[in-house]
């Protein structure tokens, strides 16, 4: 989960024309194991464009609906969660750490009640504060499977095992899902029917991201999600390209996880894997978003160029 955030921390120095030091075209290639349990070519330089290439688009960029691993990683650029996985390489990346929450959960002695308090200064891309009600609503969307199918439903099974809640589009009552309480704008309380040791891991998934009710376009939300993270959507052409730019309302002081070094992040979607690999090897792009390795033709070229 932390891979792309680690990449963002080292990819911000790439120039807009693709010839900067972050692109890798003119730099000496790192060893094959250079990124094992560490960040390869680490940099703290701010600015430029981080350029991803991919042979497939996401199943959805809606945080509720996406189920591709590469989409979960990328969503962390424009979405935050109460808790999230640390932006660290190796085993450290599996640690669940506070994100929107000030600290780790206050857990009751019976292990069935989790209480979180939101940080001060966390805002949406329009500058309005992110509230506990926004977090609750974002999670409640998992119950709208007739409209928002495809994503993880672990919390649905844990918080409402009997299936009594019908989702925010059908149940318009003020109370909503009874298992989640929001006594004030900064506090959110989860009441589990029975204890679950994996509960915080579920909260760390992007499907637990806040969604603001007045910005929810339901089945069309994945075309332009509303940002709670350091970047926001500028443009998206399905199966062609996606561009994120800085969310100027995001504050580094409110986010201990993300460094947000690049000014812009782009994805170019390819239909030909060999073409994509060639352009990656030539330094036109920084990374394969899917991170599934080179095609046979690409491997042959890479091995010839980097015999050492």
Image: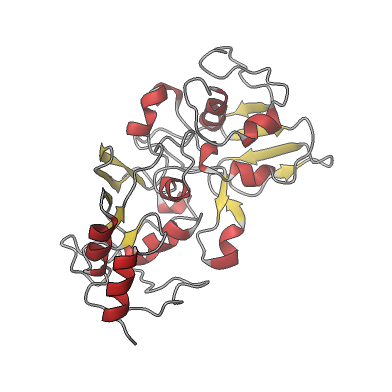
Q: Residue at x 42, y 77 (%)?
A: 32
Colouring chosen for the image of the structure: secondary structure
The spot of residue 171 in percent (x, y) is 57, 13
The spot of residue 70 in percent (x, y) is 43, 50
Q: Residue at x 56, y 36 (%)?
A: 152
Residue 111 is drawn in which quadrant?
Answer: top right
Horizontal side of 240 relative to 138 (left or right) equals: left
The answer to whether one can see residue 45 in this image is: no
Residue 203 is drawn in which quadrant?
Answer: top right
Image vertical order of residue 103 relative to residue 307, above or below: above
Near-viewer residue (236 or 140):
236
Q: How many marks?
A: 0
Q: Residue furthest bottom?
A: 308
Q: Residue at x 42, y 34 (%)?
A: 62
Q: Residue furthest left?
A: 17
Q: Residue at x 44, y 55 (%)?
A: 258
The spot of residue 106 in percent (x, y) is 72, 44
The answer to whether one can see residue 57 in this image is: yes
The spot of residue 29 in percent (x, y) is 32, 78
Near-viewer residue (55 or 218):
55
Quadrant housing the C terminus: bottom left
Image vertical order of residue 194 relative to residue 109, above or below: above
Horizontal side of 52 relative to 195 (left or right) equals: left
């Amino acid at each position: 989960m932390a891979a792309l955030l680690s990449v963002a921390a080292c990819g911000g120095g790439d120039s807009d024309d693709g010839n900067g030091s972050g692109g890798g075209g003119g730099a000496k290639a790192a060893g094959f194991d250079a990124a094992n349990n560490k960040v390869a070519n680490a940099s703290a330089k701010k600015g430029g464009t981080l350029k991803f290439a991919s042979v497939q688009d996401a199943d959805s960029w809606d945080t509720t609906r996406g189920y591709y691993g590469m989409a979960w990683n990328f969503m962390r650029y424009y979405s935050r969660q109460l808790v999230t996985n640390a932006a660290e390489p190796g085993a450290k990346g599996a640690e669940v750490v506070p994100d929107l929450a000030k600290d780790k959960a206050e857990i009751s002695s019976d292990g069935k009640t989790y209480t979180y308090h939101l940080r001060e200064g966390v805002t949406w891309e329009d500058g309005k504060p992110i509230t506990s009600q926004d977090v609750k609503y974002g999670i409640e969307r998992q119950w709208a499977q007739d409209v928002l199918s495809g994503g993880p439903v672990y919390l649905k099974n844990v918080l409402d095992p009997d299936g009594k809640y019908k989702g925010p589009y059908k149940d318009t009552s003020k109370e909503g899902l009874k298992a989640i309480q929001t006594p004030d704008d900064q506090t959110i309380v989860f009441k589990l029917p029975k204890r679950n040791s994996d509960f915080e891991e579920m909260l760390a998934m992007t499907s637990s991201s806040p969604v603001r009710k007045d910005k929810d376009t339901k089945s069309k939300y994945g075309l332009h999600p509303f940002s709670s993270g350091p970047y926001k959507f500028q443009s998206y052409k399905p199966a062609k390209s996606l561009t994120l730019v800085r969310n100027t309302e995001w504050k580094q002081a409110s986010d201990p996880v993300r460094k947000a070094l690049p000014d812009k992040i782009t994805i170019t979607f390819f239909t030909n894997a060999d073409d994509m690999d060639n352009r990656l090897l030539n330094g036109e792009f920084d990374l394969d978003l899917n991170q599934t390795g080179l095609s046979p033709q690409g491997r042959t070229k890479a091995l010839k160029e980097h015999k050492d």
